[in-house]
Amino acid sequence: MANVTSWCPRGPKREMGITMKILMAYVVLAFISLSAAAADGLQSLDAFVRNVKTAKADFTQVVTAPPKGAQAPRVKTSSGTFEFSRPNHFKFVYKKPFEQTIVADGQTLWLYDVDLNQVTSRKQAQVLNATPAALIATASDLKALQADFTLANAPDKDGQQWVMATPKSREGQVQNVRIGFKDGGLATLEILDSFGQNSRMGFTGLQVNPALDASTFVFKPPSGADVVKQ
């Protein structure tokens, strides 16, 4: 996802984690349909890819950057809510520590930074094509997922069952994605990127197939905001 950093807002307090927010957003879009699949194998995985159309949950995201020399790894924690509607709509609302909203409306990907009062937009198709994880956002069955990822069960850990997804293409920014399941639901999503940065997102209160109004994924730049188009 090499082009993401070029359109993300910059600033000392945002240099770490903003790219991973975008990357995580697309991977969640791709993998939220996998809920409860790991314990039951590929047939269950296929069923959820086909049948899960919408989802919403709270999340906490921890981004850990690799250490530099003798320095300890840098850690950044954020939290918020997300809503998702297949095949290509989602909304992330980051509430802490900085208010940011990421909306994909099917045509445009919007990022609104409240503190900066800045809106950045880009054609969604361009960003989707930038990463293997996003290429499967419209997948309707297991075969479509396997076209871009090698999927395998991983050892149980932290009371969760895990699936390892490794992109078949090495041109993107993702090294691998791990999806954790607990008590039949999606619990954790982890991304390791090509720079050694790890992002772990934990979910609570996950709702599968809730009724979501179409207006949920409509974004209009606030009056007076600086709008940057890429």
Image (spheres, rainbow, N blue to C red):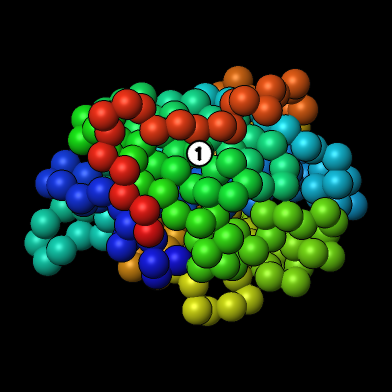
* 34 relative to 228 in the view: left or right: right
Pointer 1: residues within 10 angstroms few (<14), some, or many (20+)?
Answer: many
Give the side of residue 125 with respect to residue 86, left or right. left
Q: Residue at x 16, y 42 (%)?
A: 13
What percent of the width, then of the height, locates residue 74? 21, 49
- The quarter of the picture where the C terminus appears is bottom left
Q: Is residue 9 above or below residue 136?
A: above
Q: Nearer the viewer, residue 132 or 41?
A: 132
Residue at mark 1? 103
The answer to which image quadrant residue 28 occupies is top right
Instruction: Classify residue 120 as left or right of residue 38.
Output: left
Q: In what element is the residue under mark 1?
A: strand
Residue 160 drawn at (x, y percent)? 63, 39
The residue lying furthest to the front in this view is 223
In the depicted structure, whether residue 52 falls above or below residue 131:
above
Please provide percent x and percent y for residue 47.
88, 46
In the rendered view, would you say 168 is above or below 62? Answer: below
Amino acid beneath label 1: Val
User: Which residue reaches farthest bottom?
Assistant: 170
Numbered circles on residues, count: 1
Is residue 90 visible in the rendered image? The answer is yes
For the N terminus, the image quarter is: bottom left
